[in-house]
Amino acid sequence: MDKIQSIKGTHDILPYESEKWKDLEDIIYKTCDLFGFKEIRTPIFEKTNLFLRGIGEVTDIVSKEMYSWQDRDGSNLTLRPELTASVVRSYIQHNLKNQSSSQRLFYMGPLFRRERPQKGRQRQFHQFGVEAFGSENPEQDVEIISIAWHLLSLLGISNKVQLKINSIGSNECRKNYRKALLDFIKPNFNLLSEVSKVRFEKNPLRILDTKNPKEITILSDAPKISDYYTNEDKTHFQTILKFLGCLNIPYNIDLGLVRGLDYYTRTVFEFTSNSLGAQDALLGGGRYDNLVQDLGGKVVPGIGFAAGIERLLLILEAEKYNFKKHTPDIYFICIEQNAIQVMLSLSKKLREKNYIVVFDLLRRSLKAQMREANRFKVRYVLIIGQEELAHKKVTIKDLQKKVQYSYNQSDLFDFFNFKINS
Ligand code: HAM
């Protein structure tokens, strides 16, 4: 019979890898705790409209990459392609604004985008992200960037990433800039790619995101958004840069950075890494001061970022990050069927004291079980054979010190409390 394979662009996370995920997740939880961020978990699927209104209809994500379907009752549903819109929906739905005027939230989980799979780009991938609501002050922007920096520093990879930052200005700034950009591009409209022609009509700022060399040349003399900042935009951006300086967080201003989602206002940023290859964006985010209102809530400013977990792991692998080893403490070998009960009850007691105990379930030979104990890299092997069973003893092999002891089964605990804690 044919074997059923996983879907292209999706991956199994096998036991050896899931230990690394767990390590990384622990560090993420610790970082979020340090900044007072609380976890939010939202459903994997939502009404399609949420993403149309939240992310923007002409973005790549919404126009090409969503997994959407019509449900049996006729409603249009979508597997979430990102989490900011979902978090904002939940924030509005549960009146989180009433609980506290500033909300700090984080999340981790799977997302779905129908992109062409390649290294660091999957159709089901995972993000860790943070979203903060309530403050439009620059210290809020810097707090968000600091979380990313703190995490990357804890992981020892802050020197392997580059922070690119830009301000795409307030609504007023973008309105004026949009007009200037359209006037500039209009004479060259026919030279634009089909994608940029659509963007010209719907969201001309996104044309700045082009990777097309011909368009990059056309745009080299385009007006700069920084010339259209209001005084408040300028002060906001300058203050962020000053605060980043105080925290010794290195950055590069990138006036071409606009990001691929339509909800951003003012600050946008990305951490990229050369270790990632073509898909070099590790983490991206920005401010979205209109989104809560656009999705039916009050006027509440917000800002956040999301990092790809798979991409974080790619960098950690490339940098030979020292993941925690999850080895068992004890491998229990029973070579006498009548002793299985003793092994089960001693193992239970050891586990009650938090020792990780594994044993063979295939009733294999002593040699085969020793081979497995070595493969697991355990420190202690306990053996009960005929001799031990007859005298209520256990043989203890310390594989690290290469010594062997014989202990009464009733004294086994003393041995471990004494030995492992020493
Ligand atoms: P994004 O830039 O679309 O932003 O995604 C953030 C990160 O998710 C990327 O930098 C990348 O590491 C990872 N990522 C995206 N697509 C894929 C993929 N197909 N395969 C693997 N990893 C991927 C957002 O999603 C915004 N919601 C971020 C945000 C939060 N802005 C404000 N708050």
Image (cartoon, helix red, strand yellow):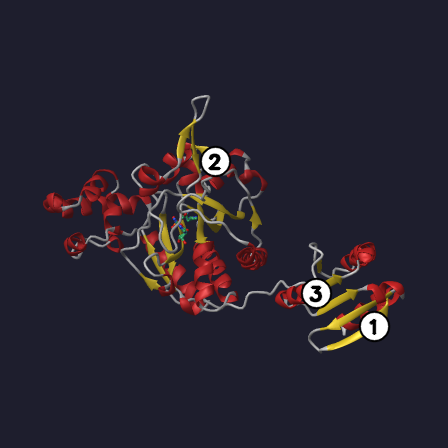
Badge 1 or badge 3: first in the primary sequence: 3
Report, in whole angstroms, how far the alpha carbon at label 2 lies from the one at label 1: 58 Å
Q: Give residue 272's position: percent from left, percent from top.
A: 37, 60
Q: Give residue 121's position: percent from left, percent from top.
A: 38, 51
Badge 3 or badge 2: first in the primary sequence: 2
- Up the image or down, 366 lies above or below 298; here it is below
Q: Give residue 138's position: percent from left, percent from top.
A: 43, 55
Question: In which quadrant of the rendered view does residue 357 lie?
Answer: bottom right
Q: Which residue is mark 2?
A: 45
Secondary structure of residue under mark 3? loop
Q: Decide which of 293, 128 is in the foreground and name it.
A: 128
The mark closer to the camera, 1 or 3, is 1
Q: Tag 3: residue type? A: Asp
Q: Which residue is mark 3?
A: 329
Report, in whole angstroms, how far the alpha carbon at label 1 lies from the one at label 3: 18 Å
Q: Tag 1: residue type? A: Ser
Q: Is mark 2 within 8 Å of ligand 1?
A: no
Q: Which residue is mark 1?
A: 406
Report, in whole angstroms, how far the alpha carbon at label 3 lies from the one at label 2: 41 Å
Question: In which quadrant of the rendered view does residue 52 lie?
Answer: top left
Label pair 3/2, CB-CB below 8 angstroms: no
Horizontal arrangement in the rendering, residue 311 relative to residue 19 (left or right): left
